[in-house]
């Protein structure tokens, strides 16, 4: 349930309410807004208990959260902005995250980083640990890749996001990156979710290949329950019977997430379609559906890429993509 404190309530009332809820065995998540403080209280509740809490001094109202996800729900908070360096997800800006599927070498990464920045992207992406379908495919440069990412970020001033696949690597990845990515294959790796939840770094949480919207929000809940509320959801397509595209981009998930949750949501048309030619139309569609950002794979020489070449845009194509989406961003009252 959410306990909304009245605007007049001071620290004494807040302390008393927190103490009482703790005595009753609730887990507490306090969010201090400009006007009022709200307390997310997770635990078993009864109608009598709700009335008893409502009667406490300083409490304006108690709102039960009926959904299985609590901290991720719209009842807990109306809106969340996730900040990564100078970039804000969930604000007016459409945040463009771009870069290669995998970090391959210094030249590949730096060339890409410089050009995506010039074209208007705000965050550099690149995988150092690659969860590949085949164990014989390129698995990533690991720590060497993280170092290259950090250096490219420092040179261009772009914050960097990279995937972490193993709970044991969370600390190491946090040393080099500004933001974690949890990939589709790990969306329900609960140990990994808890581990990034204990870190203070923001997280992009990709939707699992066969995850329902509710399962996806429950995965966000795992991270938030540990105290890390800096979660950005990413729709990257789901498995359906259709094989003409790599996955099926579930556009309706974007406005649905906006109805159910306060977390920012972005779209990844690269993995969702697996086809270069569909990235521009699906980027426009995602922005029109209310997405807060885009994630796009870019490589200086897609035909030589060690992973996801067929869906990667080259540097000029990426420039054209942003030019193409720009009018729609304006129509939606947003900016790049
Ligand atoms: C990626 O972003 O390179 C990636 C592996 O994405 P996903 O987890 O969505 O497949
Ligand atoms: Mn990829």
Image (spheres, grey):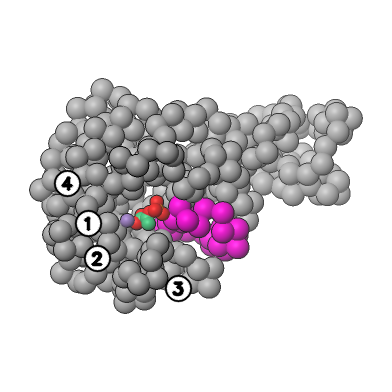
Dot 1: within a 10 Å radius of its alpha carbon, few (fewer than 14), some, or many (20 or more) residues? Answer: many
Give SS at disc 4.
helix
Q: Quadrant of ligand 1?
A: bottom left
Question: Cβ–Cβ below 8 Å for labels 2 and 1?
Answer: yes
Between disc 3 and disc 1, the foreground one is 1
Residue placed furthest toward the left = 316
User: Left or right: 25 with respect to 62?
Assistant: right
Q: In this view, does 293 lie above or below 308?
A: above
At a point 39% along the width and 70% down the height, the residue shown is: 135
Query: How far apart are the two marked residues, 3 and 1, measured between alpha carbons?
Result: 28 Å
| Rendered image: mark on residue 309 | 1
- Whether residue 3 is in magenta: the answer is no
Q: Which of marks 1 and 4 is nearer the N terminus?
A: 1
Number of numbered discs:
4
- Residue 20 lies left or right of residue 330; in this view the side is right
**Earlier-in-chain disc, 3 versus 1:** 3
**Highlighted range, magenta:** 179-203
Structural distance between the alpha carbons of marks 1 and 4 = 14 Å
Q: Is mark 3 on a helix, strand or loop?
A: helix
The residue at which mark 4 appears reads as 318
Residue shown at 38%/66% (left/top)? 134
Q: How crowded is mark 3: few (under 14 residues within 10 Å), some or many (20 or more)?
A: few
The answer to whether the residue labelled 3 contacts the one labelled 2, judged by CB atoms less than 8 Å apart, is no
**Residue 102 percent location from the top left of the image:** 29, 63
- Name the disc covering residue 172, or none: 3
Q: Which of 272 and 26 is in front in this view?
A: 272
Residue 175 shown left or right of residue 280 in the figure: right
Residue 55 position, x and y percent, is: 84, 29
Q: Report which residue position mark 2 lands on.
A: 306
Q: Position of residue 128 (x, y in %)?
A: 35, 68
Question: CA separation, marks 3 and 2?
Answer: 24 Å
Q: Count neighbours of disc 4 (C-alpha within 10 A) and say few if under 14, some if 14 to 19, many if 20 or more.
A: many
């Amino acid at each position: 349930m959410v306990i909304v404190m009245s605007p007049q309530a001071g620290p004494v009332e807040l302390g008393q309410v927190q103490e009482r809820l703790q005595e009753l065995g609730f887990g507490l998540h306090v969010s201090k807004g400009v006007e009022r403080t709200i307390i997310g209280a997770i635990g078993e509740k009864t109608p009598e208990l709700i009335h008893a809490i409502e009667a406490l001094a300083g409490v304006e109202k108690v709102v039960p959260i009926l959904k299985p996800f609590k901290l991720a729900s719209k009842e807990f908070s109306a809106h969340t902005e996730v900040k990564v360096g100078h970039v804000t997800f969930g604000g007016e800006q459409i945040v463009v995250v771009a870069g290669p599927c995998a970090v391959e070498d210094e030249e590949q990464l730096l060339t890409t980083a410089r050009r995506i920045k010039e074209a208007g992207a705000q965050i550099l992406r690149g995988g150092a640990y690659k969860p590949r379908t085949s164990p014989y495919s390129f698995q990533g440069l690991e720590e060497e890749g993280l170092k290259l990412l950090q250096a490219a970020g420092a040179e261009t001033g772009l914050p960097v996001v990279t995937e972490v696949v193993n709970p044991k690597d969370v600390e190491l990845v946090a040393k080099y990156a500004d933001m974690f990515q949890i990939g589709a294959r790990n969306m329900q790796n609960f140990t990994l979710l808890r581990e990034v939840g204990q870190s203070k770094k923001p997280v992009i949480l990709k939707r699992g290949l066969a995850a329902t919207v509710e399962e996806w929000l429950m995965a966000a809940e795992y991270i938030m329950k540990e105290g890390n509320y800096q979660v950005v959801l990413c729709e990257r397509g789901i498995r359906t019977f259709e094989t003409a595209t790599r996955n099926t981009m579930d556009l309706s998930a974007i406005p649905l997430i906006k109805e159910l949750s306060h977390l920012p949501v972005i779209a990844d048309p690269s993995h969702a379609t697996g086809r270069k030619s569909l990235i521009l139309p699906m980027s426009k569609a995602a922005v029109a559906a209310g997405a807060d950002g885009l994630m796009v794979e870019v490589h200086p020489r897609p035909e030589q890429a060690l992973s996801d070449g067929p869906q990667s845009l080259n540097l000029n194509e990426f420039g054209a993509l942003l030019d193409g989406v720009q009018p729609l961003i304006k129509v939606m009252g947003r900016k790049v």
